[in-house]
Amino acid sequence: MRVSTNQVYTQSLRAISDNQRALTETQDQLATGKRLTKPSDDPVGAAKLIRITEELDKITQYNRNTNLLKNSLEQQETILSSIKDSSNRARVLTVQAGNGILTQTDKNAIASELKQVRDEIFSLMNAQNAGGEYIFAGFQSQTQAFSFNYAANANKFKFEGDTGTNIMRVSDSVTLQTTSSGQDIFENVFARLKFTRDPNTNDNFERMEIKDQTAFDRFHKNLYDPTTAANNHIQLTVINPGEIQIAQVGTGAVLDVLPFAPDTAFQYSGIEFEFSAQVGETTQLTLAPPQKKNLAETINDFIIALEDNTLASNGFDTRISDTLVGIDNAMNKISVESSSIGGRLNIADAIYASNLDMEVANKKAQASIQDLDYAEATTRFAKQETALEAALATFPKVSSLNLFQYI
């Protein structure tokens, strides 16, 4: 077969170009440290790399979210802890105010310190995050969560936010609550459950007061009917010289029959009674509707009671009981929220650790596809360099061959 001069040149040029291209690709691999420098190097591997890169980007965002979430929850935890400390101080001062030997000057001094505690709690309820958003205002984070109107006759501390709660995604399948509304933490706190007495049905009434709040709360919660008012009326009737019957007026149901002696105190469901009634005489009480009051309002009401030098002794004792129960209920609510925050922090830590493990696994898979084997690449580079040099050295000699050289 005859080989033309053009074919010799073309074949030699192709060999040099192929060797040059292979050498350049190996140089790129060595420079970048990656085996795949373009999708055509390994289409299947390139597709896998895209999926792995997307997964790593998601994990990176989830880790950022988790860090933001933890910072927010830790700030809320600190705020609630401070409120709890202030509440404990308010409780100590309330108990101290119950000392019967205190003068009005002493009460005014306690009221003065309680004002500072109240203001501190109010400030913490309006705490802001680093972005200037009010933490406990729900979705109305640009609005102050609580306002204070000194001139208002009641409910001087008013919630201005809403019930919204923010959430943040920390993994493909897990979202966690980042904030809680002040409506739930501070507003939805039950005040002391009480009863009222009907003066028109109390024959020979002497005394009727709550002595065991826990027992009364249980009785109230089990019996209170928000729809039928008559079911909240409880009547005590002396049915014979030694017994008294306790019945629900609305249903007529007999709740209990207890031993009774005139002018002798006895208790029923946390209430202590004492009256000198005769057989057939009755007395009646009504379970009061449950009320809610935030912590700042509870403390403020007690400050007003402390500064009221016209308040009778039994009325002041009632205010002390109201305040202590209100503080305790508020602290219980805060403790529940603190426990919830702790639980969310634990979940966030677990998810973060899991995301880190997934990140390591994905990076390992990514490395197995795209990372370069330097030993193999260096050896290949030397081989390709030698081949190129040989091609470059051979071409001049081949291109100069002709029959006249052999004559």
Image: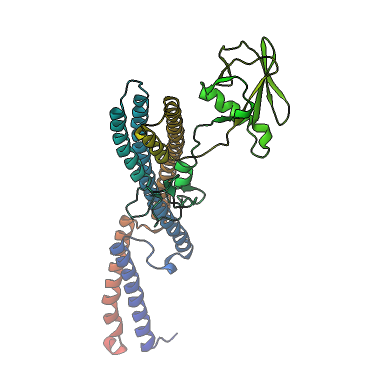
Which of the 4 quarters of the picture holds residue 3? bottom left
* Rendering coords of residue 351 (x, y %): 44, 44
Asked whether 396 or 111 is in front, the reply is 111
* Rendering coords of residue 219 (x, y %): 60, 26
Which of the 4 quarters of the picture holds residue 370? bottom left
Asked whether 163 or 262 is in front, the reply is 262
In the image, what residue occupies the spot 67% across and 12% down? 243
Left or right: 50, with 93 as reference point: right
Vertical side of 244 occupied by 193: above or below: below
Vertical side of 33 occupied by 296: above or below: above
Left or right: 105, with 211 as reference point: left
Asked whether 78 or 199 is in front, the reply is 199
In the image, what residue occupies the spot 48% across and 52% down? 162
What sort of colour scheme is used for the picture?
A: rainbow
In the image, what residue occupies the spot 42% across and 48% down? 152
On-image quarter of the C terminus: bottom left
* Rendering coords of residue 382 (x, y %): 28, 63
Which of the 4 quarters of the picture holds residue 20? bottom left
Q: How many marks?
A: 0
Left or right: 85, with 336 as reference point: left
Left or right: 394, with 281 as reference point: left
Asked whether 326 or 48 is in front, the reply is 326
Is residue 368 something that shows in the picture?
no
Vertical side of 405 occupied by 148: above or below: above
On-image quarter of the N terminus: bottom left
Is residue 249 something that shows in the picture?
yes
Query: Which residue is at the far right?
Result: 252
